[in-house]
């Protein structure tokens, strides 16, 4: 028994800069860890297996369907521990859910690492990532592995299915304004809608190819600190994503305000149909100005130097 043992693991969120949707088809994508957004997973001894979150308090395995990925992590690690000890797992901190900010990957990774440490399982990095990725598959129907890789990284992640994650330590030398529309996205729905359109005709296949090319191009110019071109890439990507019906009036309004007030480029980030908008800005000052002008269209915002 681990009566007074308490394990805390913090995992951060992420934002996809470029390559959402095309990454599902094996193309390149680029994602950024956001340390300001994080969730702490705490495991401690308890009289029954219990989950405490902002939205659910109750027996772990009776949690609603949106926690199915976590239930898989919990069952898998409990089986590995061969222990009949009961634990309470508490999730504190906030990454807004269903916004493309990596909340499900962050809690899956946090839970895997915390239970691994609590039960002294000595899982390898690879095992931890496999369990996290499997939880993401349960959550999203099809997961590229990009979210899990980025919530696990302290640096920018360049990713494709074939090569897996590679970290980029270079800075672009710009400011990223991240705005949460407050509209819930739906990754599953967005991915299946895009798949349907992708399979319908060659033009849509070419658009997805182009999104992948834009991500590859971004990686090439990133270390040259060419934020102006990255901004143009963001705008082109937004046009493509919008053509698949992934944008909303709110997203369009935020992009328009950003463009009119000095942003180098702006786009939705993540699955779409809601979620977040990112605007690439030449400075903190311009990011702040845009956030003030667009405040009627979002519920929260964050600024990161990239």
Image: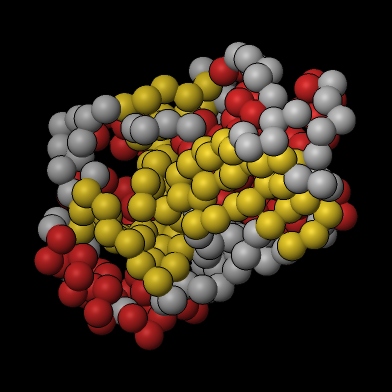
Q: Residue at x 18, y 49 (%)?
A: 174
Q: Is residue 80 above or below residue 225?
A: above
Q: Residue furthest bottom?
A: 296
Q: How many marks?
A: 0
Q: Residue at x 64, y 51 (%)?
A: 90
Q: Is residue 89 above or below residue 219?
A: below
Residue 304 seen in render? yes
Quadrant position of the C terminus in the picture: top left
Q: Residue at x 83, y 25 (%)?
A: 83
Give the image location of residue 160, x and y in percent: 52, 27
Q: Is residue 276 above or below residue 137?
A: below
| Color theme of the render | secondary structure
Say left or right for 125 vs 51: left
Say left or right for 158 vs 193: left
Q: Quadrant of residue 77?
A: top right
Q: Nearer the viewer, residue 81 or 200?
A: 81
Give the image location of residue 206, x and y in percent: 54, 42
Say left or right for 144 vs 210: right
Q: Quadrant of residue 221?
A: top left
Give the image location of residue 126, x and y in percent: 61, 17
Q: Quadrant of residue 132?
A: top right
Q: Nearer the viewer, residue 47 or 62?
A: 47
Residue 139 seen in render? no
Say left or right for 60 vs 255: right
Quadrant position of the N terminus in the picture: top right
Q: Residue at x 60, y 30 (%)?
A: 113
Give the image location of residue 271, x and y in percent: 57, 55
């Amino acid at each position: 028994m681990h009566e007074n043992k308490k394990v805390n693991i913090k995992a951060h969120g992420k934002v996809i800069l470029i390559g959402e949707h095309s990454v599902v088809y094996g193309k390149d994508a680029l994602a950024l860890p956001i340390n300001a957004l994080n969730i702490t997973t705490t495991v401690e001894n308890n009289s029954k297996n219990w989950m405490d979150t902002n939205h659910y308090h109750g027996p772990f395995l009776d949690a609603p369907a949106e926690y199915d990925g976590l239930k898989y992590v919990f069952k898998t690690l409990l089986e590995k521990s061969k222990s009949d000890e009961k634990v309470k797992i508490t999730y504190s901190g906030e990454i807004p859910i269903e916004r493309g900010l990596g909340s499900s990957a962050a809690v899956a990774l946090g839970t895997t690492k915390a239970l691994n440490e609590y039960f002294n399982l000595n899982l390898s990095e690879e095992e931890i990532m496999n369990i996290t990725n499997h939880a993401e598959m349960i959550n999203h129907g099809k997961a590229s592995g990009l979210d899990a890789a980025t919530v696990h990284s302290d640096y920018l992640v360049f990713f494709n299915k074939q090569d897996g994650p590679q970290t980029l330590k270079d800075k672009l030398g710009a400011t990223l304004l991240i705005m949460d529309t407050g509209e819930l996205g739906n990754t599953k729905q967005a991915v299946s809608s895009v798949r349907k359109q992708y399979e319908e005709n060659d033009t849509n296949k070419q658009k997805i190819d182009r999104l992948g090319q834009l991500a590859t191009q971004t990686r090439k110019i990133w270390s040259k600190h060419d934020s102006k071109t990255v901004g143009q890439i963001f705008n082109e990507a937004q046009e493509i994503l919008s053509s698949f019906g992934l944008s909303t009036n709110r997203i369009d309004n935020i992009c328009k305000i950003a463009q009119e007030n000095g942003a180098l480029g702006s786009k939705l980030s993540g699955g779409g149909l809601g979620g977040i908008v990112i605007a690439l800005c030449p400075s903190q000052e311009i990011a702040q100005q845009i956030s003030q002008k667009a405040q009627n269209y979002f519920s929260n915002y964050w600024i990161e130097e990239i």
